[in-house]
Image (cartoon, rainbow, N blue to C red):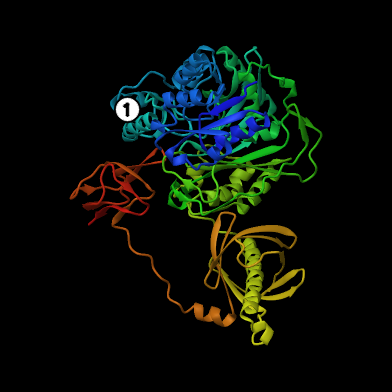
């Protein structure tokens, strides 16, 4: 076994590998760019080596710099994580020449299956059903349009060396094919150092289901069930679960056996993933094989008890698999939500800055004990687990140079409903401040009827949120629970305030029992009767809620019991009440005396400033291209400029017809959020 492993990656996956290496008694080496000098993975590793400036193409994906770090530290093996150099055969070749072990598949397997064009040709030769497409190299945008017409719109334009949603576009017409080809090519070159593009038919109403395979160098191979990855945005997975709520055992077995056969055909040895799209009749089509660890691997680990990183290291060290296909048991259900530094209220555009508050829910291990990857007995009734794979910490910076994912929150339960409910509570308990993030959106998905029923496709977000995410409107019964809780919390705050002022001792003022609670266009008149165990909140017109909590003023997280059911609220102070966040809703709750409420109704509403004649930068980023000039008339939907942030190109378009009167920024300019790019007459 190895004594020292270098992790050629950053962020949460580097931290994840370090955890397993520690468990195995293996020393670790981190590499870091200038932007990551204080990063969590650097702090966790036994050693750390600087490799260059922040851009990945000047640091993390420069093979020579990584090789120098290996020589400097004497690392015997390298785990590449995912992204960056994980599927780069030249990197594997360089390691082999240096006598360093690559914790991944052989170079030949990477070349055969890591390249999406080659892998499709091999799959076709092996009589594996594949999606129609053009696997040859595409020279320019004109050829991309011609090929797209021949295949038939809609088409998917993809980077051959791509992954993680980078370098991927869906085109529904010639203009989108032309634009998509160039953007995909640029992103592919920036992210992977390889700008080759291919085009395939985009299958509508698909489910994205992938099979986890594990093979050794002795000819053994197994599959560890499937993962459902249909909740995607911009072809980037957001929510994953294992197993899939759609597959039956026969389809699972057929997909698994085909995935293993494909892996063995190319001499695969390590953990890998074979991705399929599955239609409504459970017909499945090979998409690609990822010759690396997947972002969503934790859900497979939670339902099988197999540490995939450990298995990768053992296989790389030449060991045989200790698990057979008969040993693989799928126990319970696991769900992963990806926490991204993206603002859902701005169409999920990247957000950067300092994490002024970062408090994940406590990790909880539950369920049956495991031995050698096998389940030992049944989980106790009601047992759930919480796991959070992260690479950040409170006070740390979210950089514009890398992928916006900052954590993967996972829950496990004996049933899918248990896992979903555990995830709802975990999301409500997750405190993140200082940046825009997608926690509200994830909470909304966990409550969405289509997700709860398991009836979703890869078009879920586009279909259910066509105009973007605008927050959640809670149902009446939830609003009343929150209103009762806020009334009880306000009473506690008022008692503390009067005690601090000394008024209670002088009997000058007593805290009242009648309050008016206003939230989300609702107003409730309530009466509070308190005792040592909690408060009974009675609503005018009917309805009573019993509220118990140990919340104290200043706490930003309130864990309450309302009528015997848990309620977790993120709490912020505003004038006359609270800012409450729960289940994807962000609500201002005002708690006033009846007289204060009467006067508040007479106050005029402050209107926001008019920015309808301005193009504002929606995220911190770099202007790559300006498509228009002063005096030019633009039409609705016309491309105005391109902004690059976190390795993704974003084309900003005109929302309506107009004439450009002023351009305030040009290519190469770095802008902050809401800076004015251009103005219109």
Quadrant of the rendering where the N terminus is positioned: top right
Q: Residue most toward the right?
A: 377
In the rendered image, which quarter is residue 479 located in? bottom right
Q: Position of residue 335 (x, y in %)?
A: 63, 40
Q: Secondary structure at mark 1?
A: helix
Quadrant of the rendering where the C terminus is positioned: bottom left
Q: Position of residue 440 (x, y in %)?
A: 54, 52
Q: How many dots with numbers? A: 1
Q: Is residue 251 visible?
A: no
Task: Identify the residue position indicated by label 1 in the image.
Answer: 145
Q: Is residue 130 above or below residue 491?
A: above
Q: Is residue 334 above or below residue 421?
A: above
Tell me the residue at 56%/83% (across/down). Answer: 595
Tell me the residue at 56%/54% (across/down). Answer: 584
Q: Position of residue 569 (x, y in %)?
A: 62, 59
Q: Residue most toward the left?
A: 631
Q: Position of residue 225 (x, y in %)?
A: 66, 28
In the rendered image, which quarter is residue 267 located in? top right
Q: Is residue 559 visible?
A: yes
For label 1, count other residues whose C-alpha is less than 10 Å away and answer few (under 14), some (14-19) or many (20+). Answer: many
């Amino acid at each position: 076994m190895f004594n020292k492993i270098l992790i050629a990656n950053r962020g949460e996956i580097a931290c994840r590998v370090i955890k397993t290496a520690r468990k195995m008694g293996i020393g670790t080496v981190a590499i870091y760019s200038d932007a990551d000098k204080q990063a969590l993975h650097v702090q966790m590793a036994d050693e750390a080596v600087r490799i260059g400036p922040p851009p990945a193409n000047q640091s993390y994906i420069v093979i020579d710099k990584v090789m120098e770090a290996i020589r400097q530290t004497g690392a015997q093996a390298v785990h590449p994580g995912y992204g960056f150099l994980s599927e780069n055969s030249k990197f594997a070749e360089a390691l082999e020449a240096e006598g360093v072990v690559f914790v991944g598949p052989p170079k030949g397997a990477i070349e055969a299956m890591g390249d999406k064009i080659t892998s499709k040709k091999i799959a076709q030769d092996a009589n594996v059903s594949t999606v129609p497409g053009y696997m040859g190299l595409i020279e320019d945008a004109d050829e991309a349009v011609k090929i797209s017409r021949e295949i038939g719109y809609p088409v998917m334009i993809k980077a051959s060396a791509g992954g993680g949603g980078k370098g991927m576009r869906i085109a529904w017409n010639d203009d989108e094919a032309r634009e998509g080809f160039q953007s995909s090519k640029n992103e592919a070159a920036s992210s992977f150092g390889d700008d080759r593009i291919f085009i395939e038919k985009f299958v509508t109403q698909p489910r994205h289901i992938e099979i986890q395979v594990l093979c050794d160098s002795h000819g053994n191979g197994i599959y560890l069930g499937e993962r459902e990855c249909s909740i995607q945005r911009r072809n980037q997975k957001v929510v994953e679960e294992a197993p899939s709520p759609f597959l039956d055992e026969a389809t699972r077995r057929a997909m698994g056996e085909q995935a293993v056969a494909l892996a063995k055909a190319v001499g695969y040895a390590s953990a890998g993933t074979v991705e399929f799209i599955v239609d409504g009749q459970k017909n499945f089509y090979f998409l690609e094989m990822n010759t690396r660890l997947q972002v969503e691997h934790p859900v497979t680990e939670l339902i099988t008890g197999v540490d995939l990183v450990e298995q990768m290291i053992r296989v790389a060290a030449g060991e045989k698999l200790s698990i057979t296909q008969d040993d693989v048991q799928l126990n319970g259900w696991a769900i992963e939500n990806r926490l991204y530094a993206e603002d859902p209220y701005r169409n999920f555009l990247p957000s950067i800055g300092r994490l002024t508050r970062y408090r994940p829910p406590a990790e909880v291990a539950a369920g049956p004990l495991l031995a050698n990857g096998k389940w030992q007995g049944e989980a106790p009734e009601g047992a759930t687990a919480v796991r959070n794979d992260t690479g950040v910490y409170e006070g740390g910076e979210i950089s514009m140079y890398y992928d916006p994912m900052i954590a993967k929150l996972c829950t496990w339960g004996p049933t899918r409903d248990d896992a979903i409910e555990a995830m709802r509570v975990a999301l409500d308990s997750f405190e993140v401040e200082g940046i825009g993030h997608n926690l509200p959106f994830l909470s909304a998905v966990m409550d969405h009827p289509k997700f709860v029923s398991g009836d979703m496709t890869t078009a879920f977000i586009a279909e259910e949120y066509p105009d973007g995410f605008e927050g959640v409107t809670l149902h009446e019964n939830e609003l009343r629970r929150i209103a009762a809780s806020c009334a009880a919390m306000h009473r506690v705050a008022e008692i503390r305030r009067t005690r601090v002022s000394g008024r209670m001792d002088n009997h000058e003022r007593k805290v009242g029992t009648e309050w008016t609670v206003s939230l989300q266009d609702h107003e409730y008149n309530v009466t509070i009767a308190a005792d040592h165990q909690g408060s009974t909140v009675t609503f005018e017109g009917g309805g009573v809620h019993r509220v118990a909590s140990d919340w104290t003023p200043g706490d930003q997280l309130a864990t309450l019991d309302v009528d015997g059911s848990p309620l977790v609220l993120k709490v912020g102070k505003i004038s006359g009440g609270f800012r409450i966040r729960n289940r994807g809703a962000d609500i201002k709750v005002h708690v006033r005396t009846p007289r204060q409420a009467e006067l508040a109704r007479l106050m005029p509403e402050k209107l926001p400033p008019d920015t309808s004649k301005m193009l504002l930068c929606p995220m911190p980023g770099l202007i790559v291209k300006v498509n228009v000039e002063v005096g030019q008339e633009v039409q609705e939907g016309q491309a105005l400029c391109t902004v690059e942030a976190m390795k993704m190109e974003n084309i900003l378009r005109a929302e309506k017809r107009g004439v450009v009167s002023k351009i305030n920024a040009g290519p190469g300019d770095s802008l902050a959020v809401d800076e004015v790019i251009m103005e219109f007459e």
